Amino acid sequence: MKSPQEAVTPAPAPGVFGEGKAPKKVGDLRKNITMAEIAKHAGVSQGAISSLLNDRDYGIRVSEKTRERVFKVCRDLGYIPNDLRAVVRMYPEFGDFCLLISEQVPGGVAHPHGARILAGALAAVPEPSRPFTLGIYDETLDYLADVETLPHAVRSGVVSKFMFFGSSSASLLQTLTKRGFPVVSVGYDTPMLGVVSVVPDYARAARLAIEHLVQLGHRHIGVVSGPFGTSDWPVLELNRGVRLAAEELRIPIEAQHIVYAGPETDTEPVALREMLAHQPGPTAIFCMSDGAAAAVLALAASLGLEVPRKLSVIACGGGPGTRGLHPALSTVRLPMEELGAAAVQEIDRLVREPLPAEPSRIVLEVALEARASTAAPDR
């Protein structure tokens, strides 16, 4: 497993790169180069060049190799189009950053993880003005079949550095990688060609939480998971970590001690009450989100269960919203701000290099932060 320092290459200074040439500055680019000159150097028709620069087919089919050749000639000549959108297509390093969030993510950018990723990404954008665009995508749409449904951030033509948060849309990712734009999936593993995934070690996070409770002496542990039957990759990985920890530590996770919760703010109190009423009941609960942990603490207080003497609670997240909880919440911190920063650095590197031929993944470490909500079980 790579550490963040090993996995993420620092971004080079902004500039335009021609193959085998030193970086150019905007002032080095020229507008007085004609289509005829470009066509001559690239060995293609002026119609093909116009099609590429305007992102329209005009009935002319242009292969990826031809596209690369034309754009390389333009960059080597220092040509700069009049249209800003054409500039970004030709020199993607000049485009803005964008975070696209799936409609299926509860709360969108207000989701605790999404907000932290955005904060880390904004702080890492190299330009002093920190230009950044937000967009929403629908996983169910076929963007290849109908380009008019593409998110506005994609259709605007001024964005070239894309980050995703949420389950993948294959058609949208193919649309972007086909245009030569770098794509980084943040928080979700997306094994698609041309895509780099930057993720925390979710399975390790769950294992750390269970190990912490077992080391304190707990043998009856409850789990507040995600929605029943979910295909959400982070939840699947967290559940895998719970299973691995239970097998390694030889402790049972009983079905009666598992609660399947909805979105962050919709943990079901009835199911929690039933779990706590089960005999023997759990002496500790691992919650897969900060919101679920807050709900468990509130329910424990209403039932007169003193935390941590009668019930230990540990969460997975570590967002700023947990700071006001009482008692102070033990957590396995997910490095969401670091994910956002690492994604920006990776995109800034990729935008100056050929897109990766294979899917790749950068995994960031998680950390246990034990506080007042966990202790040895009351004997």
Image (cartoon, rainbow, N blue to C red):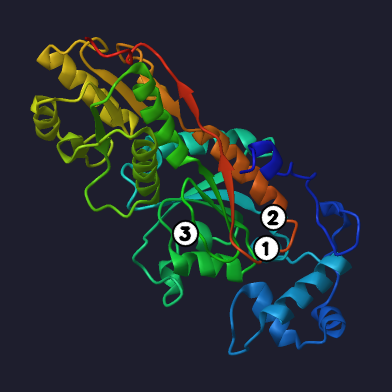
Give the residue drawn at x 20%, y 19%: 298
Mark 1 vs mark 3: give the one in front.
Answer: 1
Disc ID at residue 32 = none
Q: CA distance from mark 1 to mark 2?
A: 6 Å
In the displayed structure, 60 sits above or below 234; it is: below
Mark 1 vs 2: CB contact within 8 A: yes
- Residue labelled with disc 1: 355
Q: Which quarter of the figure has residue 320?
A: top left
Tell me how many marks there are: 3
Q: What's under tag 2, amino acid-wise?
A: Leu
Residue 272 found in image quarter? top left
Q: The N terminus lies in which quarter of the figure?
A: top right
Identify the element where label 2 is drawn: helix
Front residue of 254/8: it is 254
**Mark in the foreground, 2 or 3:** 2
- Is residue 366 among the parts visible in the rendering? yes
Question: Helix, strand, or loop for circle 1?
Answer: loop
- Which residue does the numbered mark 2 point to in the structure image? 350
Disc 1 crowd, CA 10 A, few/some/many (<14, 14-19, 20+): some
Q: Which badge, 2 or 3, is on the more N-terminal residue? A: 3
Q: Report the amino acid beneath label 3.
A: His
Residue at 83% x, 78% y is: 38
In primary-sequence order, the first of circles 1 and 3 is 3
- Residue closer to the observer: 198 or 215: 215
| Residue that numbered label 3 is attached to | 152
Question: Can you see residue 319?
Answer: no
